[in-house]
Image (tube, grey):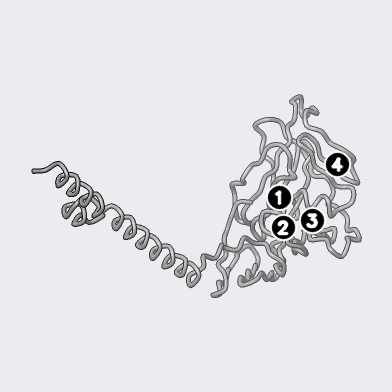
């Protein structure tokens, strides 16, 4: 065959993209990639649509604005309780108030005081002259009592005890700063005090007053207290959650 003919055939093959074999190949990788992208796109669109149609609602953590809770409160120093905090004129936006009988009324006025914001620290900020720290309690009528002071020959420590109800016998104990203790349930009993290590804080004397509160109402939950028994009525809007404080 002449060299000119071979050159023409090579040129012709190059012009046609490598011949019939090359033209007949299917770009499998390209089409696979397109298919994967399409499937992912359909999945993402479908999932987004599902989330829009089925929003996940977070559970409501009480207390919330509109709730009206009560808890018995006392401050214990070594072997006896300090007198109940007297009634004071609280600011209109105070979420914590007391009438001087040892019962503290908790009704959040702002979102910051709802749920885990309902702390004894917030109570102290609403009550002039009351303050807590990791080692002391300051009370208007008593001054400051500090952990480490001797009690029956033993050094004291600062603790907070929270009973879930008037009938509860075992409190939840918090050591250190009472400010961080959250009031997470209605009709609890709270004692903040100094006791020697190993000693137990007693229930606040106002526990008997709490038992006489006829009825307290929260959003979606009505709790009626008669004598020493508690009856909780649940409605469809929320469910009562009991906690030890």
Q: Nearer the viewer, mark 1 or mark 4?
A: 4
Mark 2 lies on a secondary structure that is strand
Left or right, 114 with reference to 3: right
What residue sits right under mark 2 in the picture? Answer: 71
What residue sits right under mark 1 in the picture? Answer: 190
**Residue at the farthest top position:** 153
Q: Nearer the viewer, mark 2 or mark 3?
A: 2
**Residue drawn at point x = 21 percent, y = 52 percent:** 12
**Lower sequence index among marks 1 and 4:** 4
Q: Position of residue 39 (x, y in %)?
A: 35, 62
**Lower sequence index among marks 3 and 1:** 3
Q: Is residue 162 above or below residue 59?
A: above
Q: How many marks?
A: 4
Q: Position of residue 106 (x, y in %)?
A: 75, 61
Q: Position of residue 204 (x, y in %)?
A: 73, 50
Left or right, 62 with reference to 50: right
What residue sits right under mark 3 in the picture? Answer: 102
**Lower sequence index among marks 1 and 2:** 2
**Lower sequence index among marks 2 and 3:** 2
As drawn, the label of residue 138 is 4
Q: Is the Cβ of the residue at disc 1 closer than 8 Å to that at disc 2?
A: yes
Mark 4 lies on a secondary structure that is strand
Rounded to the nearest whole Å, what is the CA distance between mark 1 and mark 4? Answer: 16 Å
Left or right, 7 with reference to 152: left
**Lower sequence index among marks 4 and 2:** 2
Rounded to the nearest whole Å, what is the CA distance between mark 2 and mark 3? Answer: 9 Å
Rounded to the nearest whole Å, what is the CA distance between mark 3 and mark 1? Answer: 10 Å
């Amino acid at each position: 065959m002449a060299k000119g003919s071979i050159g023409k055939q090579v040129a012709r093959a190059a012009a046609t993209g490598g011949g019939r074999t090359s033209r007949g190949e299917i770009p499998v990788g390209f089409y696979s990639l397109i298919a994967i992208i399409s499937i992912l796109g359909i999945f993402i669109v479908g999932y987004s649509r599902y989330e829009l149609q089925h929003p996940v609602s977070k559970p409501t953590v009480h207390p919330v604005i509109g709730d009206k809770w009560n808890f018995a409160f006392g401050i214990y120093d070594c072997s006896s309780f300090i007198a109940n905090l007297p009634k004071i004129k609280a600011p209109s936006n105070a979420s914590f108030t007391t009438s001087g009988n040892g019962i503290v009324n908790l009704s959040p006025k702002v979102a910051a005081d709802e749920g885990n914001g309902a702390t004894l620290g917030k109570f102290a900020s609403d009550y002039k002259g009351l303050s807590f720290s990791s080692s002391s309690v300051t009370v208007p009528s008593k001054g400051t009592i500090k952990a480490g002071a001797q009690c029956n020959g033993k050094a004291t420590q600062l603790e907070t005890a929270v009973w879930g109800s008037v009938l509860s016998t075992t409190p939840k104990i918090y050591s250190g700063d009472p400010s961080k203790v959250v009031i997470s349930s209605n009709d609890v009993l709270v004692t903040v005090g100094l006791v020697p290590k190993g000693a137990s804080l007693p229930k606040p004397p106002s526990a008997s007053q709490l038992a006489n509160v006829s009825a307290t109402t929260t959003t979606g939950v009505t709790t009626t207290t008669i004598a020493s028994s508690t009856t909780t009525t649940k409605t469809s809007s929320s469910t009562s959650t009991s906690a030890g404080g």
